[in-house]
Image (tube, rainbow, N blue to C red):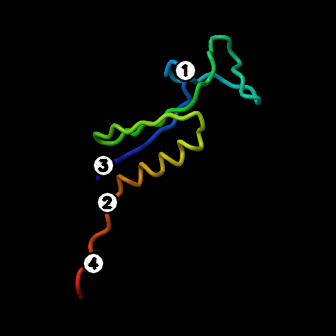
Amino acid sequence: MARYAATIKAVHADGTECTHKRTSTGKATTAECTGRDGYTARCSGNGCTWTSRNTQKTVLETQRAQHLRTHLNPPAPNRPA
């Protein structure tokens, strides 16, 4: 069975990953950070091309969970006894 994983990463406005440290108020601690523009979720499963972007991480967590459930095998049909 194929293994699927969907990761969520913070991104800048240009789409590059934001790995800069943040203060408790959310501001970047380094001058080279242009600021987080949102988050991107991407599925790394076998041939899956699902991606999603949102400004709220919690929204993406819900979408990620819904997407990963689409990769589950459907239950076997009931057979007559």
Q: Which label's residue is closer to the chain start, 1 or 3?
A: 3
Disc 1 packing (10 Å; few <14; some 14–19; many ≥20): few
- Quick check: 58 above or below 28? below
As measured in the structure, the alpha-carbon distance from the residue carrying label 1 to the one carrying label 4 is 50 Å
The disc, 4 or 3, on the residue closer to the chain's N-terminal end is 3
Instruction: Give the left or right position of residue 32, taking residue 63 as reference.
Output: right
CA gap, disc 4 to disc 2? Answer: 15 Å
- Looking at the image, which residue is at 23% across and 80% down? 79
Q: Residue at point 63% right, 20% down?
A: 35
Instruction: Give the residue type that dot 1 points to.
Output: Ala
- Indicate the secondary structure of the residue bearing disc 2: loop
Q: Give the Cα separation between the discs numbered 3 and 2.
A: 11 Å
Query: The disc labelled 3 sits on which kind of residue?
Result: Ala
Residue that label 4 marks? 78
The residue labelled by disc 3 is 2
Comparing labels 1 and 4, the label whose residue is closer to the camera:
1
How packed mark 4 is, by other alpha carbons closer than 10 Å (few <14, some 14-19, many 20 or more), is: few
Mark 3 vs 2, N-terminal side: 3
Q: Within 10 angstroms of label 3, few (less than 14), some, or many (20 or more) residues?
A: few
Q: What element carries label 4?
A: loop
Residue type of the residue flagged with mark 4 = Asn
